[in-house]
């Protein structure tokens, strides 16, 4: 029989790297995170029960190291999302589409974080501004002051399947690229967002 491999770990690692290298916030991987957290808890309980088994000390040590690796992936995934949530907190609280990308815990966090930032800014800065410039969402010369992700920044991608004549520029039908499985490309993030969502490419 083939050895059992938990596919949730590489799947969350892929989600972590995609989240890390994408300029915007990706959908929260609720099922993956919940399943792995439950797995970690179960495995840790089994390891703790085996600590008195001196005959299998080395195996217990290997299991503990693997468990720490899984914990690292989970923590790294949550940490990079938290950084983005703090960076784009105002955009998130104002745009329902962004809110759909967050977990319930992340929504509670961003609401508290946004209130704290607004209170701090009001006391130390905005209350001293001229009338008409004291808002958090004011525009300056027609440009929103709410921080936005740069969707046109270049990213490294690895194609996970063959894609013929992928259109890079919506305004230029001749600007296409043939993507081949396993090959690496540098492309603007905006046009490959759909491919990333479908799992046709990964960010590296």
Image (cartoon, rainbow, N blue to C red):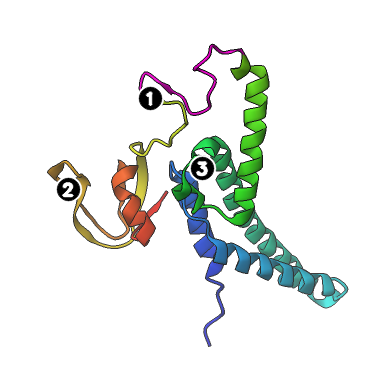
Q: Which residues are magenta?
A: 128-143
Identify the residue position indicated by label 2 in the image.
Answer: 176
Residue at (61, 69) in percent of width and height: 35
Q: CA distance from mark 2 to mark 1?
A: 31 Å
Corner quadrant of residue 50: bottom right
Where is 143 relative to 131, above or below?
below
Q: CA distance from mark 3 to mark 1?
A: 18 Å
Residue at (61, 43) in percent of width and height: 110
- Depth check, front residue: 8 or 33: 33
Residue at (53, 88) in percent of width and height: 1
Decide if residue 151 is on the left or right side of residue 55.
Answer: left
Identify the residue position indicated by label 1 in the image.
Answer: 143
Identify the residue position indicated by label 3 in the image.
Answer: 92
Foreground disc of the pair 2, 1: 1
Mark seen at residue 178:
none
> Nearer the N terminus, badge 2 or badge 3?
3
- Which residue of the protein is positioned furthest toward the front in this rendering? 131
Q: CA distance from mark 2 to mark 3?
A: 33 Å
Where is 148 relative to 6, above or below?
above
Helix, strand, or loop for circle 1?
strand
Corner quadrant of residue 163: bottom left
Helix, strand, or loop for circle 2?
strand
Decide if residue 183 is on the left or right side of residue 126.
Answer: left
> Nearer the N terminus, badge 2 or badge 1?
1
């Amino acid at each position: 029989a083939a050895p059992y491999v938990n596919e949730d770990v590489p799947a969350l690692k892929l989600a972590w790297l995609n989240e890390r290298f994408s300029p915007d916030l990706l959908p929260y991987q609720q099922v993956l995170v919940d399943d792995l957290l439950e797995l970690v808890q179960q495995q840790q309980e089994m390891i703790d029960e085996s600590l008195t088994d001196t005959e299998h000390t080395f195996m217990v040590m290997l299991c503990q190291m693997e468990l720490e690796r899984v914990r690292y992936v989970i923590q790294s995934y949550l940490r990079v999302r938290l950084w983005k949530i703090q960076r784009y907190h105002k955009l998130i609280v104002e745009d329902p589409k962004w809110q759909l990308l967050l977990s319930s815990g992340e929504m509670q966090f961003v609401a508290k974080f946004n209130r704290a930032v607004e209170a701090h800014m009001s006391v130390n800065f905005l209350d001293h501004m001229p009338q008409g410039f004291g808002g958090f969402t004011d525009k300056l010369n027609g440009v929103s002051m709410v921080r936005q992700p740069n969707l046109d920044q270049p990213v490294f991608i690895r194609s996970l399947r063959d894609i013929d004549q992928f259109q890079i520029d919506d305004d230029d039908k001749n600007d296409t690229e043939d993507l081949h499985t396993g090959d690496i490309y540098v492309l603007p993030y905006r046009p490959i967002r759909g491919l990333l969502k479908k799992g046709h490419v990964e960010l590296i």
